[in-house]
Image (cartoon, helix red, strand yellow):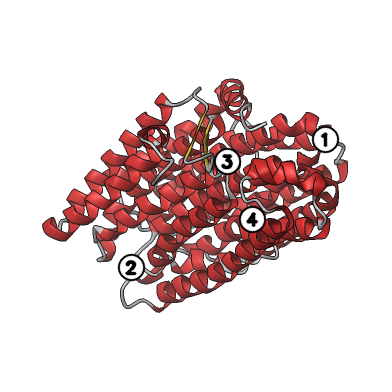
Amino acid sequence: MSGYSLTDLVNTLPITFLLLWALVLVLVEAFAKRSSLTMVLAAVGLMAAIVLSVMQFGVESSAFKGMLTIDGYAIFIYVLVLGSGLLSILLSYDYNRRMGWARGEYYILMLFSIAGAMLMASAANLIVVFLALELLSIPLYILAAFVPNNAASEEAGLKYFLLGAFAGGFVLYGIALIYGATGATDLTEVVAAIPTTQSPVFILAGAALLLIGLGFKVAVVPFHMWTPDVYEGAPTPVTAYMAVVAKAGGFAALLRVFISAFPSVAADLVPVLSALVILTLVVGNLAALAQKNIKRMFAYSSISHAGFIMMAFVTYGQPGLYADAVTSVLFYLLAFAVTSFGSWAVVIALEQAEGKGLNFEDYAGLGRKYPVLSAAMLVFLLSFAGVPPTLGFGGKFFLFRTVLEGGYTGLAIVGVLASLVSAYYYLRVVIFMYFHDGEPQVRSEPALNLVTALTAVGTIFLFLFSGQLLAWASQAVLALL
């Protein structure tokens, strides 16, 4: 431990606290064996970590010999994933009891995974990026397969694990190539060594392999194959959690690594990134059109949203647009998180045992029988489609503005067309809710109702404060640039 000090632990207090808290909960669960107690303590730990994170906002520091960076960008992601974890716990407790698999380990695994996402946001060293990726992913593999004696859940966990391990191999190989070419893994040392390297091809190949590995985590095409089956087979609260936190962690690392270490290869990567954006938007939206299961539809919808976020990433090669690009990504991630948890809350309210209640037909008559719940779902679907006055509209507006400022008019046109296509399959759900007769079965649970109400109000209310949220996101990225 020579060279490390108490200051390192203080600088990384939100992550350190969360990891220690998760270890304490392992002991609590081992002796108390009460999932309700573990759930409450996990929620308390997340709230405490949020407070610790907010206290660090505006402070720029590093830890462990520069391997971790704590700045406004990292803190923004901290608050986003910690808040997402809190919403996931609220969605999970009654659902897990209803389905018959309420176990305390569930919440402990979630805390470790959140810590991994936080580390990805702070990673200033390629080795730490890999370790954080594994800490984020391994608990997710287990959570996806958490349902006992359920073939779909076990298949989801196995597919996620196998393809995730394969993607991790790409990340490691990319790191090896970059280290071989530069002799460094710290991002600041890598960017300094690139101009003098004798192996520029290795740099480009290494960056491409990192893009593949992290592209798997955020589910961009063609690295998206796991997404529909895992989303459908995993417990629905786990699906809601991974849709937001895995995406936030993946994009947090992707932006920090490429902006900090690889600005010199931007010109070579932009055509590749543009192709990935177009593929992701086209495949995600066209595949969503054919779905009748709402979990699979939201899976392909999540893929298309990754394509929208990647649109801003394409402009990272233009120094004058760095700030706008990262700011728009952070805002979009926030908008997606709020909208996504709300929509999944409605899905959980209608889901019955053995995977029933997940088809579009099961939403028939919801508008007549449960007008408040259907109105909330309408708000979420409109936000996903980018219709004002919703938070999703603000996210897409800022993304398109950044893309147009970068001169990528063609990408913006593709994005607009993709939004129109997405409106069609979102409106299919609306048509079932309001124009088809049916007797939907809905669960009314306090925590579930709270998440639905908070996110529905937030989707509209936060849009009214888009300027302030954008200013916060803009301030958060200053240190990154």
Dots 2 and 4: beta carbons under 8 Å? no
Q: Residue at x 44, y 41 (%)?
A: 3
- How far apart, in angstroms, are the residues tagged by discs 3 and 1? 20 Å
Q: Nearer the viewer, mark 3 or mark 4?
A: 3
Three-letter residue code for mark 3: Leu
Q: Residue at x 52, y 51 (%)?
A: 128
Residue for badge 2: 353
Dots 3 and 1: beta carbons under 8 Å? no
Dots 3 and 4: beta carbons under 8 Å? no
Q: Which mark is residue 404?
A: 1
Q: Between 210 and 272, which is closer to the camera in this rendering? A: 210
Task: Please identify the residue farthest to the left as the structure is shown.
Answer: 32
Q: Nearer the viewer, mark 4 or mark 1?
A: 1
Three-letter residue code for mark 1: Leu
Dots 4 and 1: beta carbons under 8 Å? no
Three-letter residue code for mark 2: Ala
Question: Is 287 left or right of 379, judged from the image as shown?
Answer: right
Residue for badge 3: 333
Image location (x, y in percent) of residue 405 = 82, 32
Q: Secondary structure at mark 2?
A: helix
Q: Residue at x 32, y 40 (%)?
A: 17
Q: Secondary structure at mark 1?
A: helix
Q: Between 11 and 278, which is closer to the camera in this rendering? A: 11
